[in-house]
């Protein structure tokens, strides 16, 4: 009866799985006994409701297990290499309770294109999900031929899009802490990162020799907490909290955590000018130059337009920190992989009264932690306009997170003191 109702597929699939049990797939793929395409076909068929399969244990002492992906989709081709996205459930138990949450992993379809072994873990943002992958860093930046990073994300909170896939079935978090109308458990992110070295994940994305952790604004909060708790040690090689401040929780300052011996990896923090107003606890005090950097980008608001327009685009100001973020992310990568120390941290110059020091156009001046002048975005340095952060009079969101500029549009090339555009481009 069961065989008839499923067109005979259950019996056939059971026979296939007896010949190729899923917990043996990584070994068989490595030996060539079964192709990667064949293995993915078995995993995909098995997770479409035909069978209830066991989860896969991790060999990296992770407390959680990745279930085989329930969905495999193409992300497109980047410099000639196709990337696949694997979606499924990650299940386990932290020190405070059990969980079953969605995961999402992106990797080359051909593992020979992913030999460098760096996996970038991004906690999902409460409203924008994995926006670092989608825009601020971007797929081509991460997946292009110069880098071939893999990307991984996992739901760690039942609030909003922090769960990664709000439509997923069988999702719960019993541990962690009460957070709004749900629960948040940062340990899930760490469990997930450890599980990225499991046999199943190696079969999907290759060896995860390095693991990075980064988040922006809301999604930077768990990043800082993981470092402060000591859970990042021996798990993440590089941590990048972006456009974040510690007004309410100064104990989450990564530099202080490094000083206390809780973390021995590398940390690079990237901030907009607004973070100077909201809280300066993350500024580099110079106590751990082998481990910590802080970069602030003058003239930029908390929410700035991406180089390529996306849902967060607001067209409020052309000044954005995205180019600096990409540069500093790559500097951190070189710091980890090649031992090349990242450039010296920066801060906004201040007046004797403790206010932001500004140039004749009204734009914030930038110095490194020694006090030496540091370069700003070219159009800020050239004085195209006065870039204002936040919008004058703003006291509530979203305006307090935005910036503006004047005049609009900026002066003509000649008004800036350049005889023609080629002269301006040279200076830029």
Image (cartoon, rainbow, N blue to C red):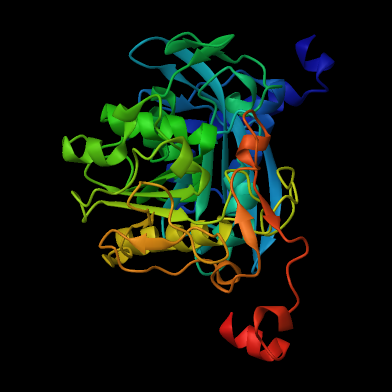
- Seen at 64% across and 28% down, the residue is 396
Q: Is residue 260 visible?
A: yes
* Residue 252 position by quadrant: top left
Q: Quadrant of the C terminus?
A: bottom right
Q: Position of residue 272 (x, y in %)?
A: 51, 49
* Residue 24 position by quadrant: top left
Q: Position of residue 306 (x, y in %)?
A: 66, 54
* Residue 252 vertical placement versus 137 (above, below): above
Q: Quadrant of the N terminus?
A: top right
Q: Position of residue 40 (x, y in %)?
A: 61, 42
- Seen at 37% across and 17% down, the residue is 94
Q: How many marks?
A: 0
* Residue 91 vertical placement versus 204 (above, below): above
| Near-viewer residue (44 or 327) | 327
Q: Position of residue 266 (x, y in %)?
A: 29, 50
Q: Is residue 115 visible?
A: no
């Amino acid at each position: 009866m069961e065989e008839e109702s499923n067109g005979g597929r259950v019996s056939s699939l059971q026979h296939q799985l007896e010949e190729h049990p899923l917990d043996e797939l990584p070994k068989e793929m490595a030996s060539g006994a079964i192709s990667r395409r064949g293995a993915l076909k078995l995993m995909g068929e098995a997770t479409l409701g035909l069978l209830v399969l066991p989860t896969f244990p991790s060999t990296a002492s992770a407390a959680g297990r990745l279930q085989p992906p329930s969905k495999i989709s193409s992300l497109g081709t980047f410099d000639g290499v196709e990337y696949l996205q694997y979606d499924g459930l990650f299940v386990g138990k932290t020190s405070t309770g059990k969980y079953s949450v969605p995961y999402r992993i992106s990797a080359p379809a051909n593992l020979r294109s992913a030999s460098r072994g760096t996996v970038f873990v991004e906690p999902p943002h409460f409203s924008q999900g994995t926006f670092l992958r989608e825009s601020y860093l971007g797929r081509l930046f991460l997946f292009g031929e110069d880098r071939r990073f893999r990307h991984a994300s996992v739901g760690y909170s039942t609030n909003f899009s922090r769960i990664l896939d709000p439509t997923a079935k069988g999702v719960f978090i019993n541990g962690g802490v009460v957070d709004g109308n749900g629960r948040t458990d940062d340990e899930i992110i760490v469990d997930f990162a450890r599980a990225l070295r499991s046999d199943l994940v190696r079969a999907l994305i290759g060896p995860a020799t390095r693991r990075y952790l980064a988040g922006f604004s809301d999604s930077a909060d768990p990043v800082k907490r993981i470092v402060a708790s000591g859970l990042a040690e021996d798990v993440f090689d590089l941590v990048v909290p972006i456009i974040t401040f510690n007004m309410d929780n100064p104990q989450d300052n990564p530099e202080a955590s490094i000083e206390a011996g809780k973390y021995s990896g590398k940390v690079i923090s990237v901030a907009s000018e607004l973070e100077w107003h909201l809280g300066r606890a993350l500024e580099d005090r110079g106590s751990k130059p082998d481990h910590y950097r802080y970069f602030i980008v003058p003239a930029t608001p908390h929410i700035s337009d991406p180089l390529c327009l996306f849902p967060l685009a607001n067209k409020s100001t052309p000044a954005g920190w995205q180019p600096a973020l990409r540069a500093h992310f790559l500097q951190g990568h070189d710091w980890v992989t090649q031992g090349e120390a990242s450039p010296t941290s920066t801060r906004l110059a201040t007046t004797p009264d403790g206010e932001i020091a500004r140039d004749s156009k009204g734009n914030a001046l930038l110095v490194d932690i020694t006090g030496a002048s540091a370069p700003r975005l070219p159009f800020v340095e050239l004085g195209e306009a006065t870039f204002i952060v936040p919008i004058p009079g703003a006291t509530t969101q979203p305006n307090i997170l935005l910036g503006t500029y004047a005049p609009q549009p900026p002066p003509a090339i000649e008004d800036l003191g350049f005889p023609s555009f080629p002269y301006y481009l040279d200076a830029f």
